[in-house]
Amino acid sequence: MKFLVCSDSHGAVRPLLGLVRGTAPDCLLFLGDGVRDVRTVLAAHPSLPALCVAGNNDAYDDTPTQRTALLCGKRVFMAHGHTYGVKRGLWRLIAAARLSRADIVLFGHTHTPLCSYERGMLVVNPGSVFMCPDRRRTYALLSIDETLGRAGAAVHSLNI
């Protein structure tokens, strides 16, 4: 399955809509700071499944700030990251993901894309659909092959 992983849209609905159209994902995973934007996207694409977590700028929203989901046989820990202090390091986030027995951890908040492995756990930050520090809009595509039990991800820049 192909998952579109996005974060930190901060009102930038057009890029999210373009990504959904351009990547044709099986599911959208959104990591906070734009949950309302995702609702707009889902109104335009009502058959698209989505999982979201709220960020520090998603005030007055009942969306959880973290969640663990079983996706194609892989346990995925999702958090915006602000409650784990990810701008000062990833150790608290990684520890929480390990406690939940995650295979994959997805987070946002920093606007800085990252795709790496931490002792066998895939760690992905898609950056920001709004804007990254180097002035790019970025997102990630996560692929999980249930039959092979493999997962992989890549971060991409959005050209708009």
Image (tube, helix red, strand yellow):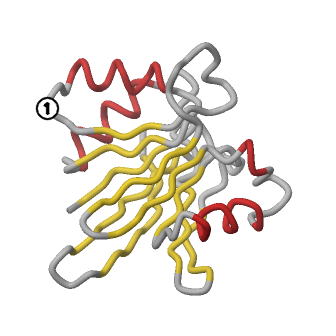
Q: Amino acid at mark 1?
A: Ser
Residue 110 as seen in the image, left or right of residue 145 = right
Q: Residue at x 38, y 54 (%)?
A: 69
Point out the residue furthest to the right here. 88
Q: Is residue 30 rendered to the left or right of residue 33?
A: left
Mark 1 lies on residue: 47
Image quarter of the N terminus: bottom left
- Judge by depth and name the residue closer to the eye, 82 or 136: 82
Is 35 above or below relative to 156? above
Residue positioned 69% across, 30% down in the render: 56
Quarter holding residue 153: bottom left
Residue at 57 percent across and 76 percent down: it is 116
Residue 156 at x, y = what percent? 44, 59
- Image-based side of 17 in relation to 116, left or right: left
Query: What is the quadrant of residue 143 in the picture?
Result: bottom left
**In the displayed structure, does residue 61 sit left or right of residue 158?**
right
Query: Regarding mark 1 in the picture, which secondary structure is present there?
Result: loop
Q: How many numbered tags mark residues here?
A: 1
Closer to us: 65 or 86: 65
Q: Residue at x 47, y 62 (%)?
A: 155
Of residue 103 and residue 111, the one placed in the foreground of this image is 103
Residue 99: % across, % down? 61, 67
Q: Is residue 147 above or below residue 71?
A: below
Q: Residues within 10 Å of mark 1 (few under 14, many from 20)?
A: few
Q: Nearer the viewer, residue 120 or 20?
A: 120
Quarter of the image with the C terminus is: top left
**Residue furthest to the top:** 60
Percent coordinates x, y for residue 64 in the rendering: 53, 33
Where's residue 46, x and y in %?
17, 25
